[in-house]
Image: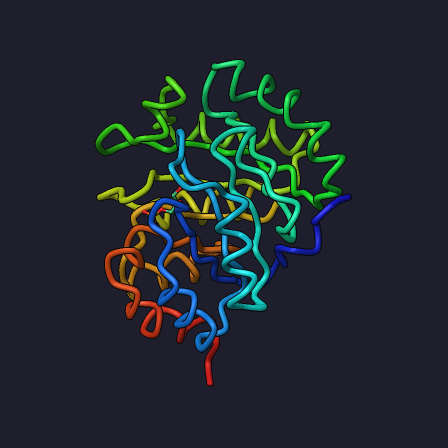
Amino acid sequence: MRLESFIKKNTCQLAVLIDPDKFDSRLIAIANTCRIDCFLVGGSGSLKRSVNSVVKAIKKQSTIPVILFPGNEHQLSAHADGLLLLSLLSGRNPEYLIAKHVRAAPKIKKMQLPFLSTAYLLIGGGAESTTQKVTQTQALTQPKEILNTALAAQQLGFKAIYLEAGSGASKNISTALIQRMRKEIELPLIVGGGINSLQKAKKIKEAGANLIVIGNALEKNPDLLFNISVIFNPK
Ligand code: 1GP
């Protein structure tokens, strides 16, 4: 099952990322009033709380779609509405390029989870991110290399590109890079990492992102969602 219609080209949607270990029902309640497009659920590394229990808790409280954003093959739930099937194309670690997918494939089939094949690109420039540490990979820094990786993803049949600056990054993905990708790559662009203000979200939206992901900043201050979501749901 595919999830291609989930990210609409020519629009920009908003996703709230829920780290299962930092689940806060107040953020879900706020999201319900802000009409965000989806929750992403997942975390890098091993989790104390299961993804399945958090997906079920969100489902009890909200009708907003819940999409898995798995850090590994164990972070799956049949209760989710779909899955970002991420392959870490910025790195050269076979575990995160294909090995985990081979282990997850029969589970995804059994759960009948709709999925979106997504090229996951770690973009560097600041401090080493948790994902870099966990996956033991380097982030991409050179625009040409980033572009060619995205082009390869497109040619290989991936359905979306995730430009990841790293959770809580001090430097989010630059608007120049998003604009360049927008011109040369046809796939929908998901952008996340370090987006912690309305101004940043607005610039990224205007640069051409199709889905903006915010986690860290909302864990710290759930009320920020009232402020940021305005540009996604103009009233
Ligand atoms: C992290 O891109 C996501 O994987 C979101 O980043 O937590 O910094 O918002 P933040």
Whether 137 is drawn above or below 85: the answer is: above
Quadrant location of the N terminus in the rendered image:
top right
Residue 156, x across and y down, in percent: 68, 27
45, 201: nearer the viewer? 45
Q: How many marks?
A: 0
Residue 114, x across and y down, in percent: 71, 46
Q: Residue at x 41, y 73 (%)?
A: 231
Whether 36 is drawn above or below 181: the answer is: below
Q: Residue at x 47, y 41 (%)?
A: 50
Locate residue 48 relative to residue 92 in the image: left or right: left
Residue 221, x across and y down, in percent: 25, 63
Residue 141, x across and y down, in percent: 34, 28
Whether 218 is drawn above or below 113: the answer is: below
Query: Within the image, what quadrant is residue 2 found in?
Result: top right
Which residue occupies the extreme bottom position in the image?
235
162, 103: nearer the viewer? 103
Locate residue 216 relative to residue 93 in the image: left or right: left
- Asked if one can make out residue 186 in the rendered structure from this viewpoint, the answer is no
Give the colour scheme shown. Answer: rainbow
81, 165: nearer the viewer? 81
- Asked if one can make out residue 123 in the rendered structure from this viewpoint, the answer is yes
Q: Residue at x 46, y 85 (%)?
A: 235
